[in-house]
Amino acid sequence: MTQYTKDHDVIATLSPEEFRVTQQSGTERPGTGKLLGNKEPGLYVDIVSGEPLFASSDKYESGCGWPSFTKAIEVANVAEIQDATLGMVRTEVRSSHGDSHLGHVFPDGPQDRGGLRYCINSASLRFVHRDDMEGEGYAAYLDQVEDIA
């Protein structure tokens, strides 16, 4: 079984925006994330630890300006923490092993898919195309990745 950890060598290579988002709990500007419009089949992993977070088949267009997902592909890899910053109470989402700030989860997602909207910063994610998943060690998740309609 793969062990995922906070990789300080990877952190040293992050762009300033990726560092600000993942390590300082920042938020990228809405509509600017490189993965917002991605419609390719594959897996979204933590940019720091590589732990699997979300499948392309669970991504949807929510109109919020950030990539949105209905559920985590591996619940154990996503930690939810109460966040009372900015004068509101929200649920922050962090990677469990890499401790990267990912974004927030809200209860206003598609009801027919569980009702959740994981609103995630592109800067915290690395996309692994379905064609590359086996070679990168993510073959166990291939059955959860479908073509996007």
Image: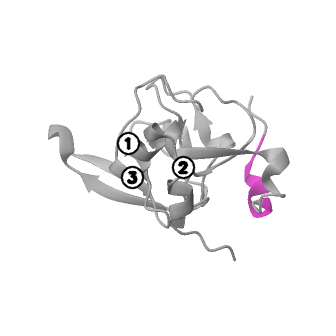
In the image, 66: left or right of 149?
left
Are circles 3 and 2 on residues that touch, CB within 8 Å? no
Bin the neighbour count of mark 1 within 10 Å (Cα to Cα): few under 14, some 14-19, many 20 and up.
Answer: few
| Residue 56 appears in the figure | yes
Report the magenta stretch's main SS: helix
In the image, 43: left or right of 65?
right
* Disc 2 residue type (three-letter): Lys
Q: Which residue is mark 2?
A: 71
How far apart are the two marked residues, 2 and 1, measured between alpha carbons?
A: 11 Å
Q: Name the residue nearer the viewer: 14 or 133.
A: 14
Could you tell me which residue is drawn at 47 percent across and 42 percent down? Answer: 18
**At which x and y percent is residue 102?**
44, 48
Question: How many labels sit on residues?
Answer: 3
Dot 3 falls on a residue whose secondary structure is helix
Q: Which callout, 2 or 1, points at the residue further toward the start of the chain?
A: 2
* Disc 3 residue type (three-letter): Gln
Choose mark 3 or mark 2, whichever is in front.
Answer: 3
Dot 1 falls on a residue whose secondary structure is loop
What residue span does the magenta drawing correspond to? 139-146
Q: Which residue is mark 1?
A: 107
**At which x and y percent is residue 137?**
77, 63
Choose mark 3 or mark 1, whichever is in front.
Answer: 3
Give the number of the disc on residue 23. 3
Q: Which callout, 3 or 1, points at the residue further toward the start of the chain?
A: 3
**At which x and y percent is residue 36?**
57, 29
Could you tell me which residue is drawn at 39 percent across and 52 percent down? Answer: 23
